[in-house]
Amino acid sequence: MSLFKQIRPSQTNQTYWIQLCLLLIVGMGAFLRLYNLGNLSLTIDEIYNAICMKSILQEGFPILPNGHYYTRGLTQSYLGAMFAFLFGANEMAIRLPSAIAGIGLIILLYLIGKEFKDSGFGLVVSAAIAFFPWAIEFSRWGRMYCLLSFFVVSSFYFAFTGFKYQNNKKIGISVLLALLSPLTHPYGMLAPLLVLACYIASKQNIKSLLLSKKIYGLVILSGLLFPIINIVVYLFIQEGNPAKVSMVFLNSYQILSTLKFSPFFLQYLFQHHTVLILGIILFSASLLYHRQTANKNLLLLLVGVCPVIFVSLYHVHYVTRYLFFAMPLLMVVGFLGYYVWIQKISESRLHGFHFKKAVPSFVTAILILFTFAEVTYSFAIPFRKHGDLYENPYYAPTLVSNYIADRRSNNEFTIKQIKPGDILITDSFHFFYYYTSIESDYFIRPGPEYFCDKNKNGCKVRYFSKTYLLNEKKQLFNIINSTDSNIYFVLNLKGNHDSVEKQIIQWLKEAAYYFSDNITIQKMFTGEEPYAIVFKISKS
């Protein structure tokens, strides 16, 4: 079925406006995901897929500097390599798979919304994902989470419609997407399960089971309560404070006083999760009243809510990105709950109102505007520059920092300055390697041993063959004392860990004092923001 059919004279004005609205939503969503896509330097985590992208271009495989294969996000790395071949190996190339997947999600949610309700609801949920800041952030990040979400959602859509309409072509597409999904992320194993669920739901003899109230109760209770119980148990084990655990549990359900979850819960489940939980409850109630459509709608409830159960078992700490893959389907379920009840109320109360059919779409869109689609925030995202802050750090793909660091210009400057024999020390060794194709000598990070493997020569940084950890002040002093070569410090003094960065500066000050007769410490370069710095230590 073509998304944009040729408009014929016999088509109604309503169809024309729906197509026009969808075109505008997709167009604006594409702008928010593609404009200035390669403007900012790479960030934490996406740097590894970018390194693999270059390796695939050269070797055909995602090989890290130490010779090991990096298998996380294989589809992201290979698609990035394809775009790098076409447009050059840069930030835009590794982010394009995410951006295109994000645009695809907008179209998919329209199709799913239309399939499970009508075109009006399809427009509402497509607009919700198009202008949702979290979805935009992931679409502009060269990591596999947006691509994973696309594979999971598209597998479900093509499997459901394929089995429903006995379309073998769609079934084949769903199987292919389901096979690609685990290559993107381990959570991609959900996609084959969705295809299987759609197959089972298409069988007539399963309809009576799907109409069972016990099944409703099992899905609803497990989906809504299990993640919360799991996290409360985790808190109790870690904190041992029943009063604190009770307050966290109660605050997480204060839907009468706020439309958002508490800051704690925001970091564990979904942004604005309270709104979606209330919508899921409304949707579940509507299924009980309209049991004749339960065979398809309960399946939607199942696939939208159950991923929360699996995700809650993994990474119960400050990492929200593992939850994004299930967000689009959860949004469909949650907002469908509001939509169907608003539709029932408008049909029973608004007799004779000319625009009665548009009321559910309009009211649900207003709800989305105030809870999910923070339009002002969304339109600011493509115009960010180095040195800006995330207004809401919970939308940031990585929670290491809410600062947008320049990790490019200082590395590109340094490679033009160094000479054979110079010593390279950096606090961002992977970025130095990506932008220069050279491994630094040392990764400076004061404190306990971190991200490294010990050998007889010291502690070698993970994934790299030549870079060693420099985590003690005496190591730095020994390096300064034992060489006559220049020492370059390539630093990003914000955007990593503040306490670590302050310690690095303190070490340099102490070195300047301790070796005051022998060395000169000079700031050689400041990047596009004031914390991207290059220092040079030279012997007097």
Image (spheres, rainbow, N blue to C red):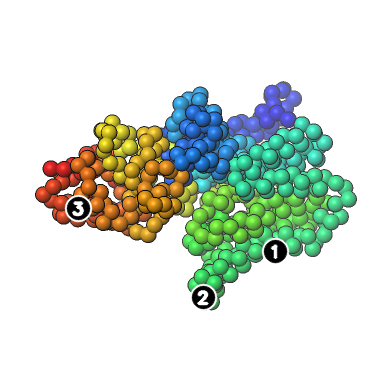
Q: Report if residue 442 is visible in the image.
A: yes
Secondary structure at badge 3 equals: helix
Which residue occupies 68% across, 39% down? 179
Q: Give the x, y percent position of residue 308.
A: 63, 56
Which dot marks residue 240? 2
Q: Nearer the viewer, residue 123 or 229?
A: 229
Which residue occupies 51% across, 75% down? 240
* Residue that label 1 marks: 221
Q: Amino acid at mark 2?
A: Gly
Query: Badge 1: how crowded within 10 Å, few (<14), some, or many (20+)?
Result: few
Q: Is residue 182 above or below residue 450?
A: above
Q: Is residue 10 left or right of residue 322?
A: right
Distance from Cα at disc 2 to Cα at disc 1: 26 Å
Query: Badge 3: how crowded within 10 Å, few (<14), some, or many (20+)?
Result: some
Secondary structure at badge 1 equals: helix
* Residue that label 3 marks: 511
Locate the C terminus and report the quarter of the image it occupies: top left
Which of label 2 and label 1 is nearer to you?
Answer: 2
Q: Nearer the viewer, residue 265 or 459?
A: 459
